[in-house]
Image: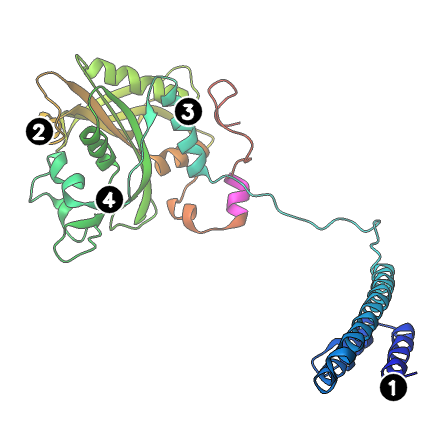
Amino acid sequence: MSEFEKKILEFKEKIKVAKNLSELTKINSEIFGKNGIINLEFKKLGSLSPDERKNFAANINSSKKELSEFFSKKSTEVLDKEIIEKVNKEKIDITLPEKDFKIGKVHPVSQVIDEISCIFSEIGFSVEEGPDVENEYNNFTALNTPENHPAKDMHDTFYLDEDMKTLLRTHTSPVQVRTMLKGSPPFKIIAPGRTYRSDSDQTHTPMFHQLEGLHIDKDINMGHLKGCLNYFIKEFFEVEKIKMRFRPSHFPFTEPSAEVDIGYRIENNKIIIGEGDKWLEILGCGMVHPNVLKNCKVDPNKFQGFAFGIGIDRLAMLKYGINDLRSFFECDYRWLNHYGFDPLDVPTNYRGLSR
C-alpha cells in the first residue's frame, strides 16, 4: 500500500468520526485545499514518465471521487443532526399569548379628501393634481393677481429663488391653470393638495390642505355654482337641510366673487351644522374672471364658469370636532387613534361618508 493510499484511509477515518461542520470544514481543506493531499499528489505528475502519468492520475482522480462522495454523505448526516438539535432547543410555546400590535389609522385630512372627492365625483367632477413647487406665472400672474398684491410679498409666500420666480404654491389654483392650458373646454375638476403660506397659529399652519374646484362650459352661471355648493355641503356634513348665504367679496381670479356662510347652532358646547341663528364662513367662490380664461387660452366670449376654494383642514375640524389645527401635524399616535379612521372603511355616498 502506497503512502498516498494510507493517507486516504486516515482521512476517511477522520471524516467518519467528525462530530460537527466545523471539524468537517477543516478536514475538507486538508484534503481538497490548495495545500491538500490531492493537490500535492498531482504536483508529482511532472516527475513521472508519460506512461506512468496516466495510471498515476487515474488513481488520484479515483481516490478524489471516493473521498468527495464519502465527505458529502457525512456532511449531510452532520447537518441534519445539527438542524434537529437546533429545532429541539428552539421549541415554541404555543400557549404563550400573542404579542400586542397596533393597527394604523387613516388621518382625518386623508379621510376628508376622500369624502370630498367621493361627493364631487357623483356630480361629474374629476380629480386633478399638480406639483407643490410652482412658477410665479401659474400661481399669480395667470390668475389675474396684480403685481402689488399683498399675497406676493415674501412674508406671505415661500420663494425658492432670489428672482421670486419659483415658489411653494399658495393655493391649488395653479392646477386649474395647468389643466386649462393642456386641454380644451369643457372642464369640470377638483384639485386637492398641500399648499404653503408663511403663517402659524391655532387655526393656521405654514403647510395646509386646500381643495379648489373649477367648472368651465357654455352658459354656466351663479345658479349652477349655488346648486353645486349646496349639494356638496349637505352631503359632506350629512344633513338634509342647510342654511347658506353668499356674501359679496373680492378675489383677483373671480368676478363676481363671494364668500359662503352656513348656518349653525351651539348645542352642548358642540357646533351643529345645518340650521341655526349663527353663521360660519366656510369657503370662497365666484365666476372665473375673463382675464384668467384669456391667460389659459380659453375664449371668454364662448365659455364661462365658476371656481371655488375650500380649506380641507378647516372642514375636518368642523365635522369631527378638532379644536387645534396644529395637532394635525404632531404625529401623536394617541390623537390619531382617537380621530383616525379604519383603513378599510372607504367613504361612499351609499354607505355613509363618516362611518
Q: Residue 198's spot in the image, x, y percent?
A: 24, 51
Q: CA distance from mark 2 to mark 4?
A: 20 Å
Q: Is residue 192 above or below residue 244?
A: below
Residue 123: mark in rendering? none
- Dividing the picture into quadrants, the one containing residue 186 is top left
Query: Crowding near pointer 1: few (<14 within 10 Å), some, many (20+)?
Result: few
Mark 3 or mark 4: which comes first in sequence?
A: 3
Q: Is residue 225 left or right of residue 43?
A: left
Mark 2 or mark 4: which comes first in sequence?
A: 4
Task: Reply yes or no: does residue 294 show up in magenta.
Answer: no
> Pointer 4: what residue?
169
Viewport quadrant of the N terminus: bottom right
Q: CA distance from mark 1 to mark 2?
A: 103 Å
Instruction: Give the SS element for disc 4.
Output: loop
> Pointer 1: what residue?
3
> Pointer 2: what residue?
291
In this rendering, which labeled residue sits more in front, label 4 or label 1? 1
Query: Crowding near pointer 2: few (<14 within 10 Å), some, many (20+)?
Result: some
